[in-house]
Structure formats: structure tokens, C-alpha cells
Amino acid sequence: MNMSITAPAILAGRIFGLDSQLLFDLLFQGIAIFVLFFFVGYLLINPVRKALEARQEKVKSDLADAARDKEDAAKVKAEYEEKLDKVDEEAKEILSEARRKAVKNESDIIAEAKEEAGRIISNAHREAELEKAKVSDEVRLEIINVATLVAGKFVEEEMDEAKQEKLVDETLLEIGEDTWQN
């Protein structure tokens, strides 16, 4: 082969120095790459995209569920705190009711004690009055006895005024001055 072919002759059958076989190969490779990307996109990228979208939807759903659960937890916490407040109020009410009952029981016990003391005092007064009446009856009987004795002595002796007064004074001394002062 002769290598002495000039450069313009080599370039005569080519576009920009490219031969038709090279252009055909480039075109065929470009179409092959386009078809390959199309099938790879169809077979691999779409399922991956769908998987990613499903995962994204699941994450959004999980976030929404977490937000709902957080709201529910806040509601339950608020209800729990409200119930605790009610329990505290009920406990305070029960304690105040117990205090009121204790005060009422105390006042009832004091009233009963005062009533019992009044009955005891009333009974003591009654017994004192009965005892006074008994003593008074005994004094009357004693006076009657003394009067009978004095009358007996008057009858035995005839008396003048001086003897009568002496006899009364003796009788009074026998009975005692305390009897006549009551």
C-alpha cells in the first residue's frame, strides 16, 4: 500500500473527516442507548420511583399518625389531669364533710353532756328538796315532841310567867338554836 495518498483525497468521501460507517455506528449506538435507557427506565426506574413514592406516602402517613397519637395523648393527659383535679376536689370535700361531722358530733356530745349535767343537777336539787322536806318533817316531829313535853311539864306544875320562860329556854337549848334559824 501506498501511503503517499494525499490528505484531500482521503477526505473526499467523508463529512468533516467522518466516514459513513462511523456515522452509522454512532447512530446505531445512540439508538441502542436510547432504547436501553427506555427499557431500564421502564423496568428499573419506574418501580424504584413507585417504591420511593410508596415509602414517602408511608412516612407521611406515619407522621400523620404520630401527630394524631400526640394529640390523643394530649387529650388523654388533659382528661387525666382534670380527673386528678376532681379527685383532689372530692378529697377536700370529703375531708371538709368529715370535719363538719366531727364538729357536729362534738357539739352533740357537748349538748348531751350538758343535758346530762342538767339532769344530774336537777336530780340533786330534787333530792336536796326532798331531804329538806324530810328534815323539815323531822323538825316538825321534834317540835311536836318538844311541845308535848312542854305541855306535859305545864300540866304537871302550875307555872308562873318566869317558870314558863325558863322552861321554853331549856327546851330551846335541848333542841338547839340552829333548828329555829332555818
Image: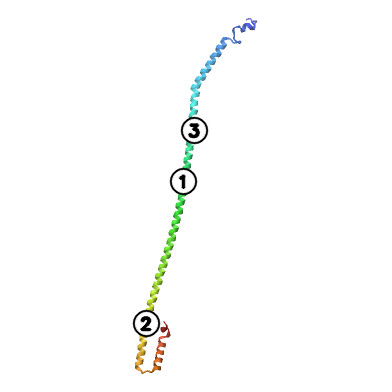
CA gap, disc 3 and disc 2: 114 Å
Q: Residue at x 45, y 56 (%)?
A: 96
Q: Amino acid at mark 1?
A: Tyr
Q: Quadrant of the N terminus?
A: top right
- SS at mark 1 in the image: helix
Q: Amino acid at mark 2?
A: Glu
**Sequence-first disc among 3 and 2:** 3
Q: Which residue is mark 1?
A: 80
Q: Is residue 80 above or below residue 153?
A: above
Characterize the local packing of mark 2: few (<14), some (14-19) or many (20 or more) Cα atoms within 10 angstroms: few
Disc 1 from disc 2: Cα separation: 84 Å
Q: Residue at x 44, y 58 (%)?
A: 100
Instruction: Check whether the beta carbons of the residues at disc 3 and disc 1 lie within 8 A of each other.
Output: no
Q: What's the mark number on residue 60?
A: 3
Q: Disc 2 designates what residue? A: 138
Residue 133 drawn above or below residue 88: below
Labels 1 and 2: the sequence-earlier one: 1
| Label 3 CA crowd tier, 10 Å (few <14, some 14–19, many 20+) | few
Asked if labels 2 and 3 touch by Cβ distance under 8 angstroms, the answer is no
Q: Could you tell me which residue is drawn at 50 percent across and 24 percent down?
A: 45
Image location of residue 66, percent across then percent down: 48, 37
Between disc 3 and disc 1, whose residue precedes? 3
Q: Residues within 10 Å of mark 1 (few under 14, many from 20)?
A: few
Q: CA distance from mark 3 to mark 1?
A: 30 Å
